[in-house]
Image (cartoon, rainbow, N blue to C red):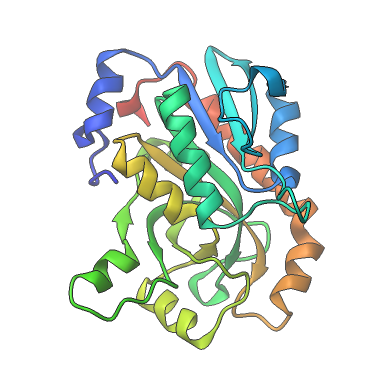
Amino acid sequence: MAPPSSSDHPAAAAVEAAGAISKVLIVIAMQTEALPLVNKFQLVEAPTDESVFPKGAPWTRFHGNYKGLHIDLVWPGKDPVLGVDSVGTVSAALVTYASIQLLKPDLIINAGTAGGFKAKGAGIGDVFLATDVAFHDRRIPIPVFDSYGIGARKTFATPNIVKELSLKVGKLSTGDSLDMSPHDESAILSNDATIKDMEGAAVAYVADMFSTPAIFVKAVTDIVDGEKPTAEEFLQNLIAVTMALDVAVTKVVDFISGKCISEL
């Protein structure tokens, strides 16, 4: 991802040359998280027979125009066998890859819910803008491969968004499990993470590959180092926290409207 200065990002230079940001891609993991934003931005679902995605892919795309921006919102859809949201790094990476290739966004927003660590200042309903991302469950104990597995990278710097919207900031750690094993806990501590999710670092990996600026807006549904079981607390808070996520993402998009990439 980008170094601290946004203007140094190779994709930023290309977008800057074209003027104001015009195409925003929102990548989101769950239908419950996606639908409030679909309604807020008055997006319409692309019919199956007009889908830009390959035949057979369960990925869903909503699109429309909002305050001078063309917004595409994509989510990986439902597992065709089990009927649950296709969460996790594989689905997130695939739909991000396809969306970058086919929709060519100026900027990606990966929005979603996350677990938070009270020891790092996170509370239920807090919304964070991730400053860094890394994986915590790709353990490859071989020199250099170990760093590849962690995949630590800076996110695209947006100091003006942070200042204007008074969002919390913190490092994000990503893995494919909702719970936290002792191995994962050790890796998350090494990543110095404030929040953990199941998609962010995978989206960042693909965005980095194709030099597309990406930012990560995460709302806390459960306290990982708290007393309640993670799954129970996640389900208990999902709807209410999704509303907080909806408000935060709307404010971010409102801020982006009419601005160049260097103004973020």
Q: Is residue 162 above or below residue 71?
A: below
Tell me which corner region of the image, top left, top right, bottom left or bottom right, holds residue 122. Answer: bottom right
Q: How many marks?
A: 0
Farthest front residue in view:
55
Tell me which corner region of the image, top left, top right, bottom left or bottom right, holds residue 222. Answer: bottom right
Q: Return the x and y of residue 263 as percentages of the image width and height.
A: 34, 27
| Of the pair 14 and 59, the residue shown nearer to us | 59
Q: Return the x and y of residue 22 as percentages of the image width and height.
A: 45, 16
Which residue corresponds to the image point at 22% horizontal and 79% vertical from the top-left?
142
Q: Is residue 29 above or below residue 222?
A: above
Q: Is residue 68 above or below residue 63?
A: above
Q: Is residue 39 left or right of residue 152?
A: right
Which residue corresponds to the image point at 48% horizontal and 67% vertical from the top-left?
194
Which residue corresponds to the image point at 41% horizontal and 28% vertical from the top-left?
101
Q: Is residue 157 left or right of residue 180?
A: left
Residue 133 visible from this viewpoint:
yes
| Of the pair 48 and 67, the residue shown nearer to us | 48
- In the rendered image, which quarter contains the C terminus? top left
Which residue corresponds to the image point at 64% horizontal and 36% vertical from the top-left?
56
